[in-house]
Image: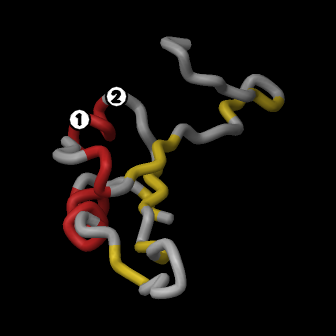
Amino acid sequence: DAGKMTYYIDDQLASCFGVDLSEYQGVVDFEKLKNEGVDFVILRIGGRGYGSAGKMYTDTNYYSYYKAAKDAGLKVG
């Protein structure tokens, strides 16, 4: 269905559709995602830099994505 995989058990929808997001996606319209049938988003919280310094960092869009996703009624993981 429109490129989305769906699974049914006894003719009942038994799957959810989600997207994986990080700062690399830029501006995201979470209301549009919800309206297009997205049920949940997986957000990158942060990561670790390369090399011996390897400092931990927070994804620059994590907090704003989290709030916008929740405001749109999406599940967040």
4 on left or right of 6: left
47 on left or right of 8: left
State how far apart marks 1 and 2 are (Cα): 6 Å
66 on left or right of 77: left
> How many residues crowd around disc 2 within 10 Å: few (fewer than 14), some, or many (20 or more)?
few
Q: From the image, tell me which residue sits under label 2.
A: 36
- Numbered circles on residues, count: 2
- Of the residues shown, which amino acid type is indicated by label 1? Lys
Any mark on residue 13, and which?
A: none
Q: Note whether 39 is above or below 5 in the view shown.
A: below
Q: Residue at x 34, y 28 (%)?
A: 36
Whether pointer 1 and pointer 2 mark residues with C-beta atoms closer than 8 Å, the reply is yes
Q: Quadrant of the N terminus?
A: top right
Nearer to us in this view, 58 or 36: 58
Residue 25: x %, y % from top left:
29, 44
Nearer to us in this view, 30 or 24: 24
Nearer to us in this view, 15 or 51: 51
Any mark on residue 32, and which?
A: 1
Q: Secondary structure at mark 1?
A: helix
Q: Residue furthest top?
A: 2
Q: Secondary structure at mark 2?
A: loop
- Of the residues shown, which amino acid type is indicated by label 2? Glu
Q: Residue at x 75, y 23 (%)?
A: 11
Q: How is the structure coloured here?
A: secondary structure
Quarter of image, res 45: bottom left
57 on left or right of 8: left
Q: Note whether 24 is above or below 48 in the view shown.
A: above
Residue 63: x %, y % from top left:
25, 73
Q: Note whether 7 is above or below 19 in the view shown.
A: above
Q: Residue at x 31, y 37 (%)?
A: 33
